[in-house]
Amino acid sequence: MYPILDTADLAPTIKKFVIHAPFIARKRKAGNFVMVRVEKHGERIPLTLAASDPERGTITLIVQAIGKTTKLLGTKVAGDSLLDVVGPLGTPTPIENHGLTVCIGGGVGTAELYPIARALKDAGNTVVSIVGARSRDLVILEAEMRECSHTLFVTTDDGTYGRKGFVTDQLQDILNGPEKVNAVYAIGPLPMMKAVCAVTRPSGTRTYVSLNTIMVDGTGMCGGCRVTVGGQMKFACVDGPEFDGHQVDFDELLMRNRTYTDMERIADERYHRCRLTGEMQKS
Amino acid sequence: MTRLNPLKPSERMKIKRQEASEQPPDVRATNFLEVSFGFDEERSIVEASRCLECKEPLCIDGCPVGIDIRSFIQALLARDFDGAVKKIREANYLPAICGRVCPQESQCESLCVLGKKFTPVAIGKLERFVADYESGHQLFQTPHIAERRKEKVAIVGSGPAGLTCAAELAQKGYGVTVFEALHALGGVLRYGIPEFRLPKEILDLETDRIRALGVEIYTNFVVGRTATVDELFDEWGFSAVFLATGAGTPTFMGIPGENFSGVYSANEFLTRVNLMGAYQFPENDTPVKIGKHVAVIGGGNTAMDAIRTSKRLGASDAYLIYRRSREEMPAREEEIHHAEQEGVKFVLLTNPVKILGSSTNWVTGIVCQKMALGEPDESGRRRPIPVEGSDYTIEVETVIEAIGQKPNPIVQATTPGLSTGKRGVVSVNDQQRTSRAGVFAGGDLARGGATVILAMRDGKRASQEIDAYLQDARTPVSTATPS
């Protein structure tokens, strides 16, 4: 069991968890993820590690409640435990000194971007960050991102905060600017990463993306996470999750990720029903 | 050795080989309960009485772990079931499992003298009977553990090789820690072999018995990621490491269309069903999708497990596509037979060349090419040769590839100086030693893909070699007491 020591609500539906997992905390590097099973009968889901504290033996996860498992996770509070947490998995993000580097986080992807931006700054890069969200209340980690960026831009789809528009609008302006951008790191929903790659492709700017795929074990056993990168089959869990975005077949991955949409809905509805009846029984 | 059997050899030969009762094919193809009920007591006695009690029993040579088959059968015949299972346990830690999944027909039973003119003694079913009798009557006793030694040994992976090695070393008094990447123990016995062939209850019982030996267990621990092999030595203080991470990485054919939704590796499909319990969705959260028409590619035991599982999940037409003929199939005869009985359609001498999909990325069919058999290849089996212009399409919504696995690369990639051969298989000598001092390996990791019993043999041999290695490493003035 992996005890939850602390939680914090970062935005509606987005929650931070500090979890006791000393072995993982010691070894975590930017870009690593863990597989989590919340309770018995549960599925294993991949979650990117936002931070770790080797001395306290803790890891930090930032999770948006979307489906059954993440919603169930969202009900957990300090003092509860997670049944299984395994990691750190995946190949850590390659951190180099590129010079001017743009870091782009979309939605909860900002939580995954944060440790990478921090490592890039520590490695001597000039980090310009763009944090995007649908609306003001979904902007997370603004202070943290500001602290590890030389410049930070915020965009919201509805214009309630920062620039109205998408992260790609801001990125295009930066690319059009006088200084040459040498690398872009983009983490967020697949359509956002695909759009970022479309913007950086004409200039050939090196673009790293972190792919979220279907996964069962997270250690290279199932092949459910396979993606086509540069015409080759790659496993996101061991070869990635980060890849050269210009080589990724996003359309295929977007469709693959819809494989279980209907069953995910069944699980989600069932969960809501159970919670409802559970609460009715309590009252 | 006194003979207990009052029957003359000629009389024994006249007794028909006993058959175990099974769930009827049409019933079992709709459930995940065990197919075979095994022998009952009387049937096992009749079967045991067929044994000729050879002076030099050849069957034992056919057993990779050298079970004293004649003695256990004699004990069984004397209705000393406890003695029979203890005899097996001298050589084999997991009799209830081996009695179910070993390919006896190509091992012990293939050498049984009775098989030359008649049919061999059903050694596997007898092994299963006494093992089940032992648990049914609570006869199991935790074996004696030798005086505690100071050295600790790390076992990486909890499949048949790892569990066997752990049990042996724990009995010799070593501090043993098993590291398992998944959340449950058993390796391929857990994620690979379906419930209807090996009930998880049996695996749980066996792993509990190994825990009872004082073996320390870490699940959710990926050696190479959570800690490296070097860290196990330097920081955790282990004196030796046994690598037994199996062959868990799926291979794909490399044909067009493999990334359509509805295409699974057998590993993913079976892991969803067996480890995650997807056959009980939505009681269990993990989903699995199976169409009415399913194609499984391959001819091994994994292919049989996948296709029979797909039947149980509701496939009406289950096609097993194999590029050679039935004779060349590597699967156990019993599995092939069971699959046939359950209505699996065998599409032999056929090789898939392309998977077809819809605009929404879902599988719609599989294009196959017919094959003819040519000259034998390096495996001794006749090489399949494509027949030009023979392409045709089978309409399916699900394709499961069961064309073989290779070792998971994580340990090899994170252990400097560990030599590997073809497909990432870890190189070992006949003492299970790797190129790294104190690091041993066995099972599918060192074989590429073999059987449960060969993995167990490796685990057992590794335990002996690790014991010898640690004894050598001890200083002559050591106070540790060798057993």
Image (cartoon, grey):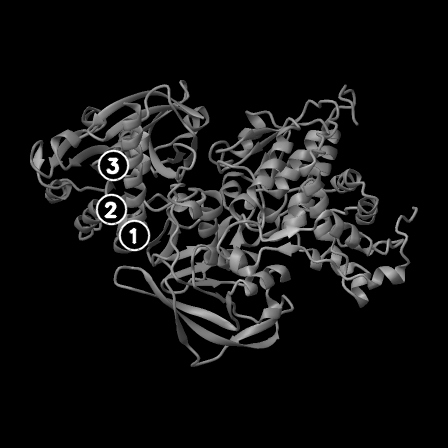
Lower sequence index among marks 3 and 1: 3
Give the numbered dot on residue A253: 1
Q: Nearer the viewer, residue B144 or B165?
A: B144
Q: Earlier in the sequence, mark 2 or mark 1?
A: 2
Determine which quarter of the picture holds residue B149: top right
| Label pair 3/1, CB-CB below 8 angstroms | no
The residue most toward the right is: B2
Badge 3 and badge 1 in a common chain? yes
In space, the residues marked 3 and 1 are separated at their CA atoms by 17 Å
Q: Is residue B77 left or right of residue B243?
A: right
> Is B122 on the left or on the right of B450, as rendered?
right
What amino acid is at disc 1?
Leu
User: In whole angstroms, how far apart are the C-alphas of marks 2 and 3?
Assistant: 10 Å
Task: Decide if residue A134 is on the left or right side of residue B68.
Answer: left
Same-subunit check for callouts 2 and 3: yes
**Chain label for disc 2:** A
Asked whether the residues under the numbered discs 2 and 3 touch, taking CB atoms below 8 Å apart as contact, a structural biologist would say no
The type of residue carrying mark 2 is Leu
x and y percent of residue A225 in the render?
Answer: 37, 48
Residue type marked 3: Gly
Camera sees residue A242? yes
Q: Residues within 10 Å of mark 1 (few under 14, many from 20)?
A: many
Q: Residue at x 47, y 70 (%)?
A: B351
Mark 3 burial class by Cα count in 10 Å: few <14, some 14-19, many 20+: many
Cα separation between marks 2 and 1: 8 Å
Query: Reading the chain from its start, which is encountered first: label 2 or label 3?
Result: 3
List the residue tagged with mark 3: A109
Residue pointed to by mark 2: A190
Picture coordinates of residue B458 (x, y %)?
67, 45
Label 2 with label 1: CB-CB less than 8 Å: yes
Q: Residue at x 17, y 34 (%)?
A: A131
